[in-house]
Image (cartoon, helix red, strand yellow):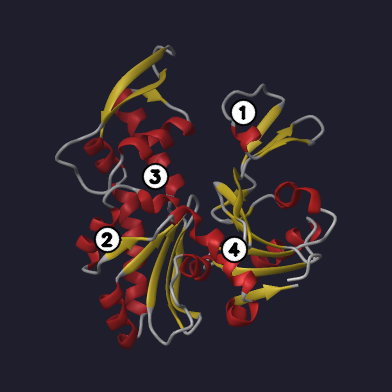
């Protein structure tokens, strides 16, 4: 790689965006959140700074995510967000236009895919490549995807859960469901509202998920004190919540995710099914860290599952690896410019 051609991998997620520089690793990990002024539509803050404003802004400022369910919901804002992340990651080398690889959900349409490429080019990329998330997650998890062997990957992010069987560098069967970390947070919020008459914010729901939630009931439950606003009196109040309550609250969402695995297994050729029984399902993405999720997958499907090392970083690592070996992975690139 010459000194003047920079390469950059972007895991453009609904909840977080990670930027990967080959030979340096993940150099940026910020929320995919933007704060906008209602009056003149100028962008006031991006990333962590914008996330810190959630739930605390005056009426004139709106904080939201320009990505929804893994695809671009607001093109102009996504482009500005990409430009910010690219320039922040490159720092002083920003006057060289980089080659950029961006991850997209497996179920993306060609129009949505084009929007990602256009946004990356307009945000300052010299060349933009788009690769489906399960492929990148598999590369990042250290799976030799070029082999004539079937590997099953389940990438559970914030907006989407992608499940795919990969063989010979390509996707053999896959599905993408719009049910992942965000929907689990929402289920927790709804449960707290219904059970305790307590309104809680997104951050609190996420804290409950990471601190005490599990996929199957625990014998030794964890508890957390939840702070929120009483729906009836409108006053601040606290409540005690335990793990097994949350297990029941998120059961429907977990069923949807397991359903995605069953759908893909049903479409998989028998030879590859045999490989998957041997190797199990590799789980990546932030939400794959939910306690005992691998056990639940095994109970419901009969196939072993394991969480990859650093599951949160797998897709970002995969972009870096694929950029370094473009010739090896060129079959996996679904669109470029």
On the rendered structure, is 113 left or right of 214? right
Query: Which residue corresponds to mark 2?
Result: 297
What label does residue 103 carry, if any? 4
Q: Residues within 10 Å of mark 3 (few under 14, many from 20)?
A: many
**Distance from Cα at disc 4 to Cα at disc 2:** 25 Å
**Distance from Cα at disc 4 to Cα at disc 1:** 27 Å
Label 1 sits on a secondary structure element that is loop
Query: Which residue corresponds to mark 1?
Result: 53
Residue drawn 23% across the image and 57% down it: 295
Whichever of callouts 4 and 2 sits on the residue coming sooner in the sequence is 4
Whichever of callouts 4 and 1 sits on the residue coming sooner in the sequence is 1
Label 2 sits on a secondary structure element that is helix
Q: In terms of image quadrants, where is residue 196?
A: top left
What label does residue 184 carry, if any? 3
On the rendered structure, is 318 left or right of 19? left
Label 4 sits on a secondary structure element that is strand
Q: Quadrant of the N terminus?
A: bottom right
Does residue 17 appear in this view? yes
On the rendered structure, is 289 left or right of 222? right
Q: Residues within 10 Å of mark 2 (few under 14, many from 20)?
A: many
Give the foreground label among 3 and 2.
2
Label 3 sits on a secondary structure element that is helix
Q: Position of residue 132 (x, y in %)?
A: 55, 69
């Amino acid at each position: 790689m010459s000194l003047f051609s920079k390469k950059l991998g972007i895991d453009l997620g609904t909840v977080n965006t990670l930027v990967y520089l080959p030979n340096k690793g993940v150099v940026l990990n910020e929320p995919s959140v933007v704060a906008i002024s209602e009056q003149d539509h100028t962008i006031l803050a991006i990333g962590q700074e914008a996330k810190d404003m959630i739930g605390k802004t005056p009426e004139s400022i709106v904080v939201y995510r320009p990505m929804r369910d893994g695809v671009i919901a607001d093109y102009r804002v996504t482009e500005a967000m990409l430009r910010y992340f690219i320039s922040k990651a490159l720092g002083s080398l920003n006057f060289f236009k980089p080659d950029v690889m961006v991850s997209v959900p497996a179920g993306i349409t060609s129009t949505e895919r084009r929007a990602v490429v256009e946004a990356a080019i307009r945000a300052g990329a010299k060349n933009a490549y788009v690769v489906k998330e399960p492929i990148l997650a598999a590369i990042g998890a250290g799976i030799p995807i070029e082999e004539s062997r079937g590997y099953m990957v389940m990438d559970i992010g914030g907006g989407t859960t992608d499940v795919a069987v990969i063989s010979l560098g390509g996707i053999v069967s896959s599905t993408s469901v719009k049910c992942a970390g965000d929907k689990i947070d929402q289920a927790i919020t709804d449960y707290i509202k219904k059970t305790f008459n307590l309104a809680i914010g997104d951050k609190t729901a996420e804290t409950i998920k990471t601190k005490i939630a599990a996929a199957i009931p625990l014998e030794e439950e964890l508890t957390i004190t939840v702070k929120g606003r009483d729906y009836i009196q409108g006053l601040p109040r606290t409540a005690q919540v335990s793990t097994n309550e949350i297990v029941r609250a998120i059961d429907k969402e977990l069923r949807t995710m397991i359903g995605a695995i069953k759908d893909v297994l049903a479409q998989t050729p028998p030879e590859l099914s045999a490989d998957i029984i041997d190797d199990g399902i590799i789980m990546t993405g932030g939400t794959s860290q939910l306690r005992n999720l691998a056990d639940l997958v095994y109970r419901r499907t009969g196939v072993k599952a394991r969480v990859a090392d650093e599951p949160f970083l797998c897709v970002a690592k995969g972009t870096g690896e694929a950029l370094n070996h473009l010739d090896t992975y060129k079959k996996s690139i679904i669109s470029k410019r």
